[in-house]
Each structure stands twice: as C-alpha cells, then as structure tokens.
Amino acid sequence: MNKNVYITETNCITPLGFDVESNWNAMLNGQTGIQSFQNDLLPEIPYHASVIDTNKINSSFEKIEQNTNFTRLEKMMILALQPTISKHTISPKTAFILSTTKGNITALENENNTIQSAQLSQLAKKIARYFGFTTEPIVVSNACVSGVLAIAIAKRMIQTGLYDDAFIVAGDEVSEFVLSGFNSFQAMSESPCKPYDKDRNGVSLGEATAAVYVTSDESKVNSKSVKVIGDGSINDANHISGPSRTGEGLYRSIQSAMHEAQISADKIDYISAHGTATMYNDEMEAIAFNRLQLENVPVNSLKGFFGHTLGASGLLETVVAIESANRNQLMISKGFDELGVSQSINIITENKEKQVTCFLKTASGFGGCNTAVLFEKI
C-alpha cells in the first residue's frame, strides 16, 4: 500500500508580499503585482509584468545572511525556503528539488561569467550547499508545469522509499531573455492579462519564488496540511508552443490523477487552473474540463494577480490554493469579465466562502506538457 504524502509547510515571495499571509491579504483586497514598464529589458515597446522590488529583496536577505555573493534569484529562493527549512531537520534521506525554467539566465548578461554560471544544476547545488543538504539536488525544468510537477515527483519518490521527505523550491525572474522570447511569439498582452475573458490577448509575465515541505511522517502533519492524493503528467506532443486543440494532454493528466485518487468529478470542490490568457491555452482548458464533467466546478486563474511566473507558477498557485482550502474561501479570477471560451466553465467572479475538501491544480506548457495534481484537506 502506498504511503500517504502531505504538504505541511508553505511559503512564497512575490511582488504582493514575502509570506503567504501578506500575499493572501493583498489578493483579498484586489491588489495585483502587474504594472506597466518601459525600460531597457524590452526597449521597443511598453509591457506589463509583475516584478519584485530588488531593494526589498536585498534588505530582506540581509536580515538572514551577510554574504552577498548570491544572484537576485538565489536570494529569492533562499528567502522562500528559509522559514520552512528552519522548522525541520535535514536528514541523509531528505530530497531537495528545485523547479525553474530559466534559472540564472541573467548571469549570461555579464561577459565575465561563464556558461556554467547559468546552468540549472549549478543553481541547485549552490542552494543545496547553503542549507546543508547531503543528497544530490534534483532539478525539474519542464516548461511551465515544472512547479506542480515537482510535487508529483516528490510524492512518488517518497512513496517508493527513496526519500523520507522533500523540500521543493520554485522560482523564475522577468528577464530580457524571457521577455524577448514571449514577445517573439506575439504572446504578450498589451494590458494586464485577462484569463478566459473574451478580450484576452496574451500573457503578463511575472516573477516569484515558492517553497513547500513534503513528507509522509504523520507526526509532522498539522491542521493546515493537505494530502497529495493523485497526480498525472501527460505530454500531448502537439506543437513546440501550442497545446492540443482538444485538450488531450490535460484531459488525460486529470483523468490519471482522478483514477489514482479514486474520486469522481463531483468530489472536486475547486480547480486552480493554469489560465495564461492566451487564446489557445484557455480554450483547450475549457474543453478538457468539459470532457471530464468538471464544467460546474469553481475555477480560477491567479495570473491576474502574479502574472505568469513560468517555472514558479505551479508551485506558487498550489501554495495559494492550499491557503484557499484552509480558509474555505475562493479567490476571484482577476481580470475576467465575460466568458471568451467556447465551452462553459464556472469562473469565480467574486471572493466567496465555500467548503473545500478536495481541490485540483493543473498546469500546461510549451512542448505539449501537462500536469494535474489532486489534494485533500486533512
């Protein structure tokens, strides 16, 4: 029989706050981190993004560490992990999983740096050394499903006995490289993003880090813990950047998670979806949800608050979804006004109380990757 696996601790660093509670309160008040920018990162056009104040990162980091030999992203990751790790002991069977898409890509802007300085493995090793992990760090870099996929990987490795517990950190920055890439796809919105809305026209990028602690040790479970009850990750192999028009990969990922959890659609109380506000992503999600009879389940996208934080998005949005479940309160899908997908889905249009016992987190990304993870409140 498989072990029960739980998430017992969470944290996040975003433009809205440097812990879960401050982020939640900002969202409850309708705040968004998305602002308009016109600077050297993308000099041709103004753009909208959710960017953390670097001075705030530095001042917060200085309170816990005097050594300044860390990149901006490394500081963000350490700030996300530190409160969580401080509550636990790292053992020889504790896994460290780092999720990101671009990592320290900004290191290559400095001509004195080598290619090695931007390698994801080096980033993971540096963070692992800082906290004293003795196991080899694991890097999950599978486009925009990376953050939530890391949870599924931790769960499976703990259930097989390879590790006893795991710390996961996920993070990405808004950089010239990322901005230029999305701009070349013509995928960036001219205004703050509007997931699932008829007037949506692309993503607003964002940056964040998030961290969680995953364990099977029942003695570490607390009143705010959630159980990871099922997962699935299917690649639809449709296109290098476009999802399957039928939502096939997402459909099968959710189906796999539901099969493992042995639950039906009517037992799912809430869906934290990907919702990038691109034409094809939002449409295929609506199709996939309908194929699984999930069209009436309350659903939101958090991209209107944080922007698309790439490899951090799945973990960050899981952290917020856990908070939502613990508070039995559903958060508005910010930016949404009028349904703009072909099939009806139950978009959350106002903050409201609802009993949440089981919830679903989904993510989809470039290269046809899709991941779904189901959680149950203790």
Image (cartoon, rainbow, N blue to C red):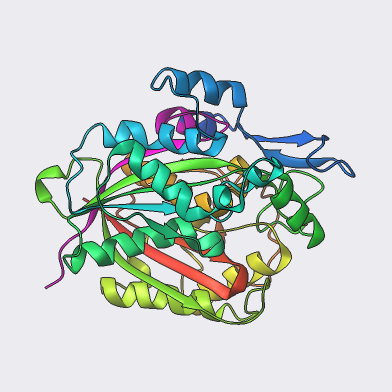
* Residue 367 in the figure: left or right of residue 203: left
Residue drawn at point x = 41 percent, y = 30 percent: 21
* Residue 277 in the figure: left or right of residue 141: right
Residue 258 position within the rendered picture, expressed as x and y whole percent measured from the top left: 34, 73
Residue 204 in view, yes or no: yes
The furthest residue to the right = 44
Q: Is residue 20 above or below residue 94?
A: above
Start and end of the magenta stretch?
1-24
Q: Is residue 154 magenta?
A: no
Residue 342 position within the rendered picture, expressed as x and y whole percent measured from the top left: 68, 72
Residue drawn at point x = 46 percent, y = 33 percent: 24
* Residue 218 in the figure: left or right of residue 204: left
- Pick the front one: 136 or 44: 136
Q: Is residue 37 above or below residue 191?
A: above
Residue drawn at point x = 78 percent, y = 40 percent: 41
How many discs mark residues in the rendered view? 0
Residue drawn at point x = 55 percent, y = 35 percent: 71
**Quadrant position of residue 306:** top right
**Quadrant position of residue 107:** top right
Residue 93 position within the rendered picture, expressed as x and y whole percent measured from the top left: 18, 54
Q: Is residue 14 magenta?
A: yes
- Pick the front one: 158 or 360: 158
Q: Is residue 306 above or below residue 271?
A: above
Residue 90 position within the rendered picture, expressed as x and y whole percent measured from the top left: 20, 42
